[in-house]
Amino acid sequence: MHRLMSSVWFLLVALVVIWGMTWPIMKMGLIWIDPLWFTVVRLLIALFSLIVLLLFLGRFKLPHKEDMPIVLGVGILQFACLTSLVNLGLAEVSAGRAALLSYTSPLWVTPGAHFFLKEQVSSKIMVGVAVGVCGLLVLFNPFGFDWSDQTVVKGNVLLLLAALCWALSILHVRKHQWKGSALELAPWQIAVALLIVIPLAYWSETRPTVWSNELLVIVLYCGILTTAFGQWASIRVAQILPAVTVSLGFLMIPLAGILFSALWLGETLTLTLGVGTLLITLGLLLQIKRRV
């Protein structure tokens, strides 16, 4: 049992590091590849990796008929929309800021769970939401954000839409009555996403892909470690560790993204980003604390 807990803690730490590093790595990858084709290549590699893993485990199978709504829902909202919107937004926004905005999804999950799933939400949890929203307002204040730069505005809006899509996916996952496991359904969800993203990438390509050794390493990292391994590891830690521990661990991912972006890309931690990060993190932390 002690060895199992040690290995799961290692998985959680590895997940925080891998997903935190993903943000500057994706930002570098977008130098050579169109955002939507980046999504396609990443998902194709993840699909192949997950199929190999499930075949090795003897768990690769067709989804249950009852699971088709979650296959379509997560495939469209999380793998297609979230991944594509993140790449499109990241092309215009610094990696650290992009990580922070994308991980604001819990702010939208709380009111969504109240209105759509009829979950009870205490006033103290809503305080956490309010604090997090204040953090967003700080990020977009006219003294620290250039509203005249339409490219940057578009990038930030796309990242907030990505967070909203992720929140909707989380709400769907909460409501669905699962027959198969999340890992077993992931390849089919990715396949649904590819049916959407491949035509979009083909018809909206903005620039040709310039293949290089660096880009190859980046797409392999994002496909195998970020998506395939990340999907499995996140499920594994959620199965064994307490929900609060997992939530706190995931809270570290955007902070790791900001740190790695500063170290590798030389991004500056401005006062606006610092205060916004502090408030959003505090808001999410308040929600986690009050759910214990």
Image (cartoon, rainbow, N blue to C red):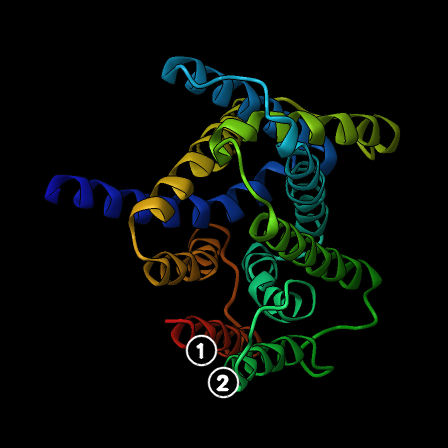
Q: Residue 192 sits in which quadrant?
A: top right
Q: Is residue 200 above or below residue 98?
A: above
Give the position of the N terminus as an image quadrant: top left
Question: Does residue 11 sit above or below 111 in this rendering?
Answer: above
Q: Is residue 215 visible?
A: no
Q: Which residue is mark 2?
A: 124
Q: Residue at x 49, y 23 (%)?
A: 50
Question: In this view of the protein, which residue sits in the foreground, 91 or 253?
Answer: 253
Left or right of 73? Residue 292 is: left
Q: Residues within 10 Å of mark 2 (few under 14, many from 20)?
A: some
Q: Position of residue 18 (x, y in %)?
A: 40, 43
**Residue 271, x across and y down, in percent:** 53, 79
Q: Residues within 10 Å of mark 1 (few under 14, many from 20)?
A: some
At label 2, the amino acid type is Lys
Q: Residue 97 occupies which quadrant of the picture?
A: bottom right
Quarter location, residue 56: top left
x, y (%) of residue 232?
Answer: 42, 34
Q: How many marks?
A: 2
Residue at image position (55%, 31%) is 186
The residue under the point 53% across, 48% down is 23
Q: Earlier along the polypeptide chain: callout 2 or callout 1?
A: 2
Q: Locate the C terminus and report the quarter of the image it occupies.
A: bottom left
Look at the numbered discs 2 and 1 and tell me whether their residues touch, using CB distance below 8 Å.
yes
Q: Residue furthest right?
A: 203
- Amino acid tagged 1: Leu
- Judging by the rendered image, the residue that carries numbered circle 1 is 286
Observer able to see residue 52: yes
Disc assigned to residue 216: none
Number of the front mark, 2 or 1: 2
Q: Residue furthest left?
A: 2
